Image (tube, rainbow, N blue to C red):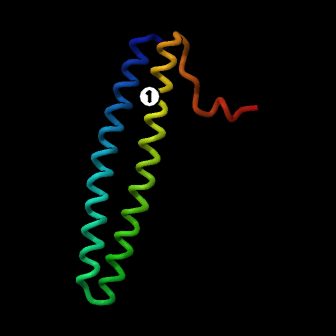
Amino acid sequence: MSNEELQLIKQELEQFITELEKFNHYAKLLGINAAIEAVKQEESMRRAMEIIATGLNDLTESCSVMIDRTRGHVLNIEQQHLDGTSPAHPNDSKKH
């Protein structure tokens, strides 16, 4: 892969990270709002809002993992670019 191709991939991954971070931020805010609304509601609605808040929390945790993994891929591309070698495939280390 050429340096230009690597840089393009890196830029696209960085943009993906930015979009994931925005999504994650708004999902966290929505989860907080759902938890606050849950306190204000009657029992059946309270439970539904608690489930929504929990689901949003789980979603943001998964999104944080995706952000971290994507950052790892960007760092790998940067390192490979500095070394002048092709980026390693993430699954290469799992092969025996």
Rendered position, 85 above or below 45: above
Mark 1 Cα-neighbour bin, 10 Å: few <14, some 14–19, many ≥20? many
Q: Height in image: 38 above or below 82?
A: below
- Does dot 1 land on a helix, a strand or a loop? helix
- Side of 95 where 31 appears, left or right: left
Rendered residue at 26%/63% (across/down): 30
Which quadrant of the rendered structure holds the C terminus? top right
Up-down relation of residue 44 to residue 32 (above or below): below
Residue type, numbered disc 1? Val
Residue 39, percent across and down? 27, 81
Percent coordinates x, y for residue 77 in the rendering? 47, 22
Figure label count? 1
Residue 35 vertical position relative to residue 23 in the rendered view, above or below = below
- Where in the figure is residue 80, as x and y percent of width and height? 51, 17
At horizontal 34% and vertical 44% (from top left) the residue drawn is: 20
Left of 29 or right of it: where is 91? right
Q: Nearer the viewer, residue 5 or 80?
A: 80
Q: Residue under label 1, please give it.
A: 74
Residue 45 lies in quadrant: bottom left
Q: Is residue 80 left or right of residue 59?
A: right
Query: Residue most toward the bottom?
Result: 43
Q: Residue visible at 32% across and 45% down?
A: 21
x and y percentages locating residue 51 in the rendered image: 39, 74
In-image side of 34 versus 93 (left or right): left
Outermost residue on the right side: it is 96
- At x 36%, y 20%, the residue is 8
